[in-house]
Amino acid sequence: MSTRQLPPQDPDHIRVLDILEQTMADGPGFRTSIYCAGCLHHCKGCHNPQSWDFKGGKEYSVGELLDIIKADDMSNVSFSGGDPFFQVDAFTNLARRIKEETDKTIWCWTGFTKEEIDADERLSKLLPYIDVLVDGPFVLEERDTNLLFRGSPNQRIIYLKGKPVEDDIPGTVPLVKFR
């Protein structure tokens, strides 16, 4: 996908469907999960098809989201959706501020593969701020309910900054390293 297909973006605002605080469903430990609006992948069997609408949810400023994230000392952060890479400018801004102003880790789910992101200058600008990328589209025909944090085995949990001890998920996912 080319960034020419990305919708118009405001780097200071994110369309959000929901914010779940202290959830344990979106990565290890407690997390503040930001579920964004908008996705063009339209995976067959998507568990969240209401997230496809780019006009869904509510608009938050990056500052408002950062305040919510910072208010919870115990939780790390997860970006999901929809697909955060369809709002890459604002998510990059938010992730940069999270890293500058907190010590929280960030997990991010996307239907793009890491290779697609790496090949696109605009999409790849979010990666330096992400600790863990869960990549690839959901494939209904390969659905596996025994997998943690992903729906089909083609989706990879990629530790972009090394695998921290507190994120250990014994026996569930292979460690995939990228340079």
Image (spheres, helix red, strand yellow):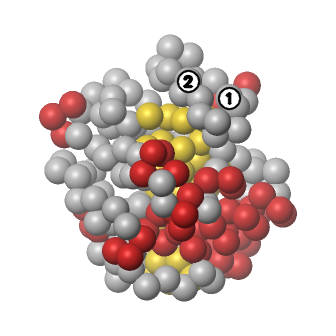
Q: Are marks 1 and 2 in contact (CB under 8 Å)?
A: yes
Image quadrant assignment for residue 135:
top left
Which callout, 1 or 2, points at the residue further toward the start of the chain? 1
Which amino acid type is marked by label 2? Leu
73 or 3: nearer the eye?
Answer: 3
Query: Mark 2: few, some, or many residues within 10 Å (few <14, many ≥20)?
Result: few
Is any atom of residue 76 visible in this view?
A: no
47 or 163: nearer the eye?
Answer: 163
3 displayed left or right of 106? left
Give the quarter of the figure containing the C terminus. Answer: top right
41 displayed left or right of 157? left
Q: Which residue is mark 1?
A: 163
Residue 115 pos. (x, y %): 45, 45
- Residue found at the very far top of the displayed protein: 171
Is any atom of residue 93 visible in this view?
A: yes
Q: Secondary structure at mark 1?
A: loop
**Residues under labels 1 and 2: Cα distance?**
8 Å
Residue 155 pos. (x, y %): 38, 37
| Vertical position of residue 14 compared to residue 92: above or below | below
Say which residue appears at 63% left-offset and 24% top-offset: 168
Say which residue appears at 47% left-offset and 77% top-offset: 15
Which amino acid type is marked by label 1? Lys
Q: Which residue is mark 2?
A: 175
Query: Mark 1: few, some, or many residues within 10 Å (few <14, many ≥20)?
Result: some
Say which residue appears at 34% left-offset and 24% top-offset: 146
| Vertical position of residue 75 compared to residue 51: above or below | above
Residue 77 pos. (x, y %): 64, 53
